[in-house]
Every structure is written in structure tokens, then in C-alpha cells.
Image: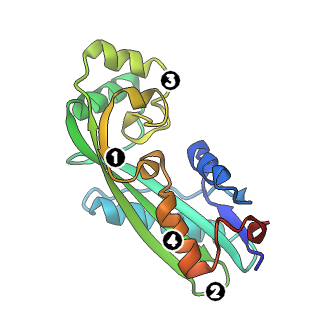
Amino acid sequence: MNKKIILASASPRRREILKNLGLCFRIVKSDLDEKIRSDEKPQHIVMALAFEKALDVAGSVENNTIIIAADTIVYKDTVLGKPKSFNNAFNMLNLLQDDVHYVYTGLAVIEKGTDRKYVTYEKTMVKIKKLSETKIKKYIETGEVWDKAGAYGIQGFGGTIVQWIKGDYFSVVGLPVSKLDNILLNYFNIDIFDIDKNK
């Protein structure tokens, strides 16, 4: 079986994760205007956004193409998106420091031209260390915070401010690979260990 795979995301983290799995894929960025309704539960937000991204990209690709889409949010009493200013980033990190929060990643996999689709989510608990104002400011000055929900990236300098996690590390990065592997194998007959199948 020779299926074309599309990653419906321009995220360099998600691209790197799929690349490391040896999958042959191409990127088609969704132009979806992400609208978050604050009255919805975080798991519903990320699943809906991931599915909408997949559907958006499906409109521009050929039948029998597998589309993978994901959406990640940081949640602590409210949804924390990507920071828009230095002060915004500082306030987010100050809110998260010395406490736990949750990272939700929605995952949608659909096959264009068929009824096959699977939408789910992963929830991971993250504990951020106690941080001084100086530490927070120095972290922001690395420039890493700007395209990250919650103003940190666990795979970079942000790893130094994370005390521990409970759950899927890759979900915090942006793509829960263990769950993705299960979905591809059980619902789409794609084995990531069978590299030739994906070329």
C-alpha cells in the first residue's frame, strides 16, 4: 500500500518529529483562522481545531491522501496561547512558575475521499520550577517563547524551567507520536516501521 501523507502544519517541531520517524510526507499548511471559544473544554478545543485543520487541507489534495493535523494549547484555569509581547510572555510564565498546568494536544488523521477519520487528544501534566523574575526575563530574551503556546518550548531552553512532566513528552512538543502510531496502524494500515510502505 502506497499512501501519500500530508502534515497539515508549518510547525518545525511537528515536522522534525515526523522526519525522525522516517515517514515520507509533505507539508501543506492550513490557512484556518483558529478561533478558540473560552467556554469550551480544552480537550474539545484542540480536537475541533485539529479536525478543522485536517479538513481545510483535505480540500486541496488528491483522494486517498492521509492528512495528519494537530493543535496544542497550554491550560491553567484558562487557555494560554502564544505571547504577543514581552509583558504578555512574562505574565504567562509568572503564572505557570512553581505550579502545575496541563498541555492538551488534539490529533486528527483523515483519509481524503473516504469516510476514514480519527480524532483524539492527549493530556500531559507539566510542573514548572520556581522562577525568579530574572530567570523569566532571561528565558524570554532567548527568543524561544514567541511561537509557543504558554510561552515556553520544552525541547529547547524551556527544558531548563520544567521540573517534571506526567504524560507524553512528545505531546508537549506538539505531536503525540505513540498515539499517532496506533492510529496509523490500526485505522489506516500504515506501519511506521515499514518505511517502504510510506515512499
Which element is circle 3 on?
Answer: loop
Residue 170 at what x, y percent from top left?
A: 47, 50
| Residue at 36% from the left image edge and 28% from the top image edge | 89
Q: Quadrant of the N terminus?
A: bottom right
In the rendered image, which quarter is residue 192 located in? Answer: bottom right
The residue wearing badge 1 is 74
Q: Are marks 4 and 3 in contact (CB under 8 Å)?
A: no
Q: Amino acid at mark 3?
A: Gly
Q: Is residue 12 left or right of residue 171?
A: right
157 relative to 38, above or below: above
Q: Earlier in the sequence, mark 4 or mark 1?
A: 1
Q: Earlier in the sequence, mark 4 or mark 3?
A: 3
Mark 2 against mark 4, which lies toward the viewer? 4
Which element is circle 2 on?
Answer: loop
The residue wearing badge 4 is 182
Viewer-closest of 18 and 39: 18
The residue wearing badge 2 is 114
Mark 4 against mark 3, which lies toward the viewer? 4
